[in-house]
């Protein structure tokens, strides 16, 4: 929709040497989701062990750090935006910052340690 190949970069696994050169788009998307779920599990575990769970800043930092992968991934890909395409990076950055925010929201809704901590305050 934007005219930039950010979605192509999101699904890009060209740099993973043990994968075949061409894999179906659904499998590329599934791999991206597995990484996303893994990060979500780590974030949730961090919150469960933390005395102050569900820090928004921590979730946004995860989104920010994952957005910085744009530059090496774009450099490694021949079918994605250029690493100097700042419009594409802005879309990528916005999406990953939104991902970080959704980690925070999901943790607040789903994580039982937050509900327990909240009920102890009441």
Image (cartoon, rainbow, N blue to C red):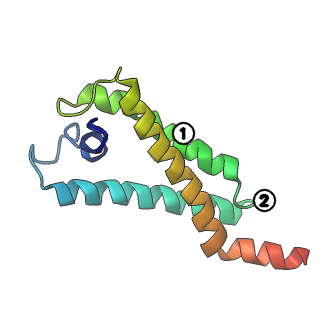
Q: Nearer the viewer, mark 2 or mark 1?
A: 1
Relative placement, left or right, of 117 versus 5 is right
Indicate the secondary structure of the residue bearing disc 1: helix
Q: Nearer the viewer, residue 73 or 92?
A: 92
Task: Name the image quarter holding residue 77.
Answer: top left
How many numbered marks have been drawn onto this rendered protein structure?
2
Indicate the secondary structure of the residue bearing disc 2: loop
Decide: is 63 above or below 45: above
Which residue: 67% across, 77% down?
112
Which residue: 18% across, 40% down?
17
Q: Where is mark 2, residue-wise? A: 52
- Rendered location of residue 38, percent (x, y): 44, 59
Q: Earlier in the sequence, mark 2 or mark 1?
A: 2
Relative placement, left or right, of 76 versus 43 is left
- Rendered location of residue 4, percent (x, y): 28, 35
- Rendered location of residue 30, percent (x, y): 27, 60
State how far apart marks 2 and 1 are (Cα).
21 Å
- Rendered location of residue 92, percent (x, y): 41, 39
Relative placement, left or right, of 46 versus 39 is right
Decide: is 1 above or below 113: above
Which residue: 58% across, 66% down?
106
Relative placement, left or right, of 103 versus 55 is left
Which residue: 12% across, 52% down?
23
Decide: is 72 above or below 44: above
Q: Nearer the viewer, residue 38 or 27?
A: 27
Q: Where is mark 1, residue-wise? A: 64
């Amino acid at each position: 929709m934007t005219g930039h190949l950010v979605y192509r970069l999101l699904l890009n696994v060209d740099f993973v040497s043990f994968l075949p050169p061409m894999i179906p788009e659904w499998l590329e998307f599934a791999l991206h989701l597995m990484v996303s779920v893994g990060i979500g599990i780590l974030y949730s575990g961090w919150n469960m062990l933390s005395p102050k769970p569900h820090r928004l800043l921590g979730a946004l930092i995860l989104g920010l750090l994952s957005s910085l992968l744009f530059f090496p991934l774009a450099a490694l890909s021949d079918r994605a935006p250029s690493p100097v395409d700042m419009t594409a990076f802005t879309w990528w950055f916005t999406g990953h910052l939104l991902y970080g925010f959704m980690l925070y929201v999901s943790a607040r809704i789903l994580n039982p340690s937050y509900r327990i901590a909240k009920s102890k305050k009441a």
